[in-house]
Amino acid sequence: MFRRFFALTCALAVVGALSWGANAAPISGSFGIDIVFYPQGPVINKVDLIDMKFEADLILTLSISGLDITSTTVFTFLGVEFQSFVISATVGALTIKDTIIFSPTFFEFEETRDQYGRLRWCLQDSLPVFPATDPARCQFPARISGYIADPVFGNVYFYEIFLGYWHPLVQNLVLARWLDPTNALNNVIRFRKKIADLSLNIAGLVLNVKALFANVSPLPTGYTLRSGLVLSMEGKTVSGVGVRGELWLGAKQGLECFGECKPLERFFNQMITGGGFNNVEEEKIFLNNVVIAGVRHDFRAEFHFDFTQCHIDQVDNDNDGWFYPYDPDPAEVLDIRNPLCFMQLKQAYTFTPWRLNVQTTWNWNGNFDLISNLTVTQMKAGDVAVTAYFVWRNNGQWSMGQPALSEFVMTFDPPGLQVTSDIIFCTDTVYCVLAGLPPVLAHYLGISGTVGPVSIAALLTFDGGILGQFAEFDVDVGFAFEPVAVTFSAVILADMLGGIAVSMNTKF
């Protein structure tokens, strides 16, 4: 214990010394502290006991003649849970960036897409090792979206965490409660990952090589090295059209995180499977900013050369308009016939006289079947904006209320204040009927504003109606006194306190 507190004391001393001499040294950075208070159990009595969670992060950057060296350290009561070093430099047309990560834990999340093309994540290799039956783990094709069964907040899916659907305080507590019983943060801090990133710009054509190395041993003191490569080429035409191609060798789209998987400890699109040139995993093609008749088009295509890595059904076996896993026919199975797994086209146009913005997204499977469409329309008038989301999904429901309004947002945004009403509708008619869900799934009422150094943001959540059952109240109050910022956060549920957090951050 003395060693752990000694490390934290040294870090605070370093911050003080650097702050005192920052004007004379090419060093910048930040130091932050987060203290979270939360009830000990999910069943709350009139008087309950409170647990406390502490963490701190220290970021230091040394800049010398175009060379930047950045150190990121995350501390808890158990000592250091994450350490990374990033060295970056630009030499003429060559940009070099090297990242080295040390941690007692690691988590490799595979990035998947469901049958409608939506991003999902599930856990593959990790330390600590979770059993195959754990809901966080991938079980293809049955489970492509992992989740954590939290005793307070229920089933929290990883895509809800990584895409920011939950309040940061909730993310912090859910991930900590998931990991804490494993005692994994007491493991030895070892080398976990290295990312060597080189980019060369030749007359506007950018060539990039990203070499990935990871220690994926399931043992705390073990060493099992995997390597992978991501090769990419990107350029723009004279008219501004962007073209990009990616080849993934021994690596695939995913997310790796370390420590307790907090935002500073997450690295997107870098899951390593190993094998290098002998393991061709994926290819991606992007075509951006193609403007035709005033309409902008952005296109992407994803290829999986290992067919088992594609989870979007390509064949409607009984030709009834339904695909796996949403076809009620038990004979319908996941059927992948070619490496083209997913295609997406985004179109955007602005009707200037009416200040109406329209964006529509088309998703196809590898057999060129349209699997879903999302259309977003937004109209502004002064300080008021109205946004409507319309969704269509290919599950045999053309005659059952689709396309349908899935979300309706109204925003009032005068200077210094913003008020938002966000209504979520149940758009899958069959699922809503079978599950007995109401037409309005949730209603979010938010308000945020700033007065001098004080800022406040509050979000009220109702389930099952526009003013249905109270579900959650989130509030953040911030005070900014340069270079120090202090934030107080609280999450209040219908029958208990979710948690309270106090955060302080200073820059130097």
Image (cartoon, helix red, strand yellow):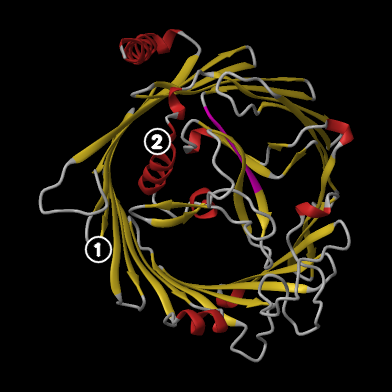
Residue 205 is marked as: none
On the picture, is 429 further left or further right than 252?
Answer: left
Where does the N terminus fall, quadrant-wise? top left
Locate the C terminus by quadrant: top left
Q: Amino acid at mark 1?
A: Ala
Residue 180: assigned label? 2
* Residue at x-position 37% and y-position 14%: 11
Q: Is residue 85 above or below residue 468?
A: above
**Residue bounds of the magenta highlight:** 105-110
Q: Nearer the viewer, residue 186 or 102?
A: 186
Q: Is residue 107 left or right of residue 187?
A: right
The residue at which mark 1 appears reads as 494
How many numbered marks appear? 2
Q: Position of residue 233 (x, y in %)?
A: 84, 40
Q: Secondary structure at mark 2?
A: helix
Foreground pick, 253 / 240: 253
- Check the image and report above or below for 73 versus 436: above
10 Å crowding of disc 1: few (<14), some (14-19), many (20+): few
Classify mark 2: residues with Cα within 10 Å, few (<14), some (14-19) or many (20+): few
Query: Magenta segment: does it hold 106?
Result: yes
Q: Position of residue 306 (x, y in %)?
A: 83, 49
Q: Nearer the viewer, residue 128 or 383?
A: 128
Secondary structure of residue under mark 1 = loop
